[in-house]
Amino acid sequence: MFMEKLTRDAHGVGEAGRLGEDGGNSFRARRFERLDVRCPVRVRIGNRQYAGYLDNASDGGVKVSTGSRIIPACKVIVQIPDLPPLRGELRWSSEREAGVAFPLVDGFHPITDWLARRASADAVRDEE
């Protein structure tokens, strides 16, 4: 399986297992594994604040959804429960969803430990 992925990536085949119309990779491979996470967050994008939910997260960033239309801006701050506010970069946005990437902080991804704690808590709940 690992070798299949390497082969697909080397030949420009996207995550869906097919080439784009131009023969190149129309699907960008993800650098980090995404985990489904559902928790409330506050997001500041530019001068606007949004109440929303974290939909999924990885070491490198998060996907958030909000109840109102997102107006794109370059400065983003995400407030996740049990973490200090995280500065990020808006990578994409649609009507009510956005992807935020987090830079390394002192050589570490800022939410790696939080994701690990969350995963272990979910595993304990699943065993009960």
Image: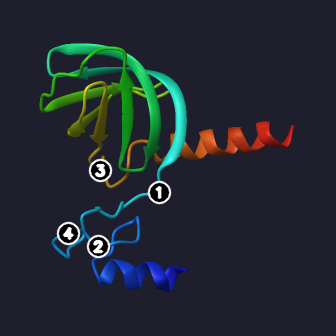
**Residue that mark 1 sits on:** 33
Above/below status of 108 relative to 38: below
Amino acid type of the residue tagged 4 in the rendering: Glu
Q: Nearer the viewer, residue 37 or 94?
A: 94
**Is disc 4 in contact with disc 1, using a CB cutoff of under 8 Å?**
no
The answer to whether residue 75 shows anywhere in this view is yes
Kind of residue indicated by mark 2: Leu
Cα–Cα gap, marks 2 and 4: 7 Å
Residue 21 badge: 4
| Image side of residue 27 versus residue 117, left or right | left
Relative image position of residue 39 (x, y in whole percent)? 52, 25
In this rendering, the count of numbered labels is 4
Closer to the chain start, of discs 2 and 1, is 2
Q: Residue at x 33, y 27 (%)?
A: 78
* Whether label 3 touches label 4, CB < 8 Å: no
Say which label, 3 or 4, has the lower sequence index. Answer: 4
Q: Which residue is mark 2?
A: 19
